[in-house]
Amino acid sequence: MRKELQPLLTPWKIGNCEIKNRIVLTSMGGTDLFGWMEINHFDKDGARFIMEVAKNNCGLLLPGCQPVYNPMFGQWLYKKKKMFEDLKKWMPEFHKTGAKLFIQLTAGFGRSFTISKMMEMLYTHKALRVLAKPFMNLEKICASASPSPNRWSDKVPSREMTKEEIEFFIQAFAKSAKMCKDAGVDGVEIHAVHEGYLLDQFTLKYVNKREDEYGGSLENRYRFAIEIVKAIKKECGKDFPVSLRYSVVSKTKGFREGALPGEEYVEAGRDFEESIKAAKLLQEAGYDMLNCDNGTYDAWYWAHPPIYMPENCNLEYVEKLKPYVDIPLVCAGRMSLETGAKSVKEGKLDGVGFARNFLADPEWFTKVINEQEKEIRPCILCHNGCFNMCHYKGVPNDQSLGDSLHLSRCAVNAEMMQWNKHKIVPTKNPKTVHIIGGGIGGMEAARVLKLRGHNPIIHEKSDKLGGTFIPASAESYKGKLRDLLAWYRYQMEKLQIDVRFDDEIKDISQFKGEPVIIATGSKPRILNIPGKEKMVEACEFLNGKQVGDVVAVIGGGLTGAEIAYELELQGKHPLIVEMKDDLVSQPGVCLANSSYLREYFAWKKVSVYLETKIKEVKDGSIIVTDKQGKDLELKCDSVISSVGYIPTPLVEKGDSVYLVGDCLAVGNLRSVIWRAYEVAMKI
């Protein structure tokens, strides 16, 4: 292991519990040991993931948050004794790894509960609301500190929790923690005075307007969280470790409005001065560790940093908090190993939290220890597979049911949490398989084919591998995507895959019936308007074509928005023209990603023209038509077209001919990689 990283291998303690190193797996929905949004049970997939990470040198593991009251079926966690018995049988095998396990218990979501269109229908239709109560009581699930708007929907507001309900939750935490202790678990983590979840909603002044003992003063607002730890300590003993997931600063301007890095704003939630007092209060109450970040659901990009957020984005405030408490602090959120190790060495941090890295590559820290870092498949911070809850104007969470029920899958690792569906099965009939196109889809197909025992040959018409992923990863902030491209290219070398450059295939008949995978991608959609020849296509810009100072970006989907973001970072002056009524109005893009871009453009005063169509491109300007049918002339030096792509398969699929990637259907990296994996498994 590199010398500068060695502080990460030093032991530390949470109360009397010794942790072998400083690497902490922080919780992700979908990695739960008792199931996620389903009838509680000992979850074999969650257990498999946790065990795999433990075997790969993680010191402390926190599975996905476990509601003490299951919002989907109205079950109290502590009443499901069988799964705790199963957990007890599993724990000795886990402890053989030398790792420690804290189960994260949550009070739930309150106004942050992710509402879908179906849930809106269940709530707004009186008869359906009554019928749905046994399995989805939205009035109870969404109850908060005070009446408040839901983060996702205007149609399902939150009512105020009663004191009786609060007491039920406190006792449920204590009983559930005791059952965890009796099962051999090393500690529990309370979720959360963090991210604007239910317990945090009680602490935040802009949400909590109560006038009883749970509202008003700082002591009252933190009373719910304090009574929980006291009840657990009473039930489990003072030496049983209890951590708290804690957001140091809320970074929130108000309901549905966050504060971006570097932005001046008035804090609506917890500012740093309050955080000092709160942390001391929480420590005195009995919490043995604070597992820290920043943000709320209203400022979601702090707790779930997309690629636009800076590395180590939460560390500054965690390090500032360290002198004020005597208990250990962990920091999570785009942490880098180098910065984490330096902070640990200097005594400014105790544990370094990572999550999505383990989805992309559960062995990544073992590879770091063995100095095999080029072998690590990197997380690209996309949220496409693990957490793609998306939201745009007029639409609550626009996520497929399959994705809602199966979080913590991974866009770049098709096998993760899909082991029954995606697994390498050696072939009994090795074949030569021709792959037309060396983009990500082609390389993933070749990788899986080779691992199965086939002989893949990539025919790439250019002189390099990567295809459209080369421009897609070109923006200055997309270093993680370039890391993924480097990983794929390395895999081609390591697996000794036959790659033939400058080899454009126009006729597959030459392959005489051998299996062929078409991975020829797509072509840009061209608007048929006057002056279209004056436009720069998105990939042309990303490949280096120069543009002027004021740049009109036509198309406000994810690609167009990211191009506008890059232009603004370069000091240019973009404007965006989009036909829809919101930016990034597309499924599959996490709210953490899209809200960052929308709020960034608002902060930087980037002109955004929604429900607007381009009509003509002129020299020095464009003509657009707004939703009232009025024509406007917008001055600009250059125009970038980002209005989508059209599949361009070399041939249609047929016997022994398979299509992968955008030549089948234009999608995202997840759809490309998963489809390529599945096709390679069929051959």
Image: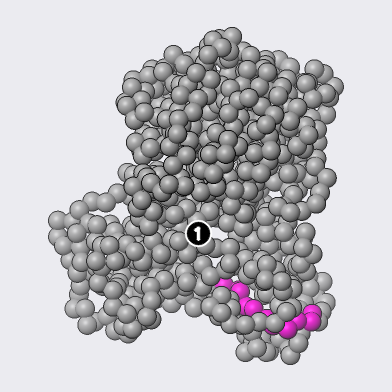
Left or right: 198 with respect to 671?
Answer: right
Dot 1 alpha-carbon crowd within 10 angstroms: few under 14, some 14 to 19, many 20 or more: some
Q: Quadrant of residue 453?
A: bottom left
Left or right: 453 with respect to 615?
Answer: left
* Figure check: 449 above or below 335: below
Name the kind of residue labelled 1 in the image. Lys
Left or right: 641 with respect to 421?
Answer: right
Q: Which residue is mark 1?
A: 480
Nearest the viewer among 426 and 281 is: 281
Which region of the structure is painted magenta? 634-644
Report the label total. 1
Nearest the viewer among 387 and 631 is: 387
Q: Quadrant of residue 650?
A: bottom left
* Figure check: 2 above or below 518: above
Residue 531 percent location from the top left of the image: 67, 89
In the image, is residue 615 part of the stretch drawn in magenta? no
In the image, is residue 642 part of the stretch drawn in magenta? yes
Which residue appears at 38% of the width and 46% of the height? Answer: 1
Residue 203 percent location from the top left of the image: 74, 29
Which residue appears at 36% of the width and 74% of the height? Answer: 437
Left or right: 150 with respect to 245?
Answer: right
Residue 204 percent location from the top left of the image: 76, 33
Q: Quadrant of residue 114?
A: top right
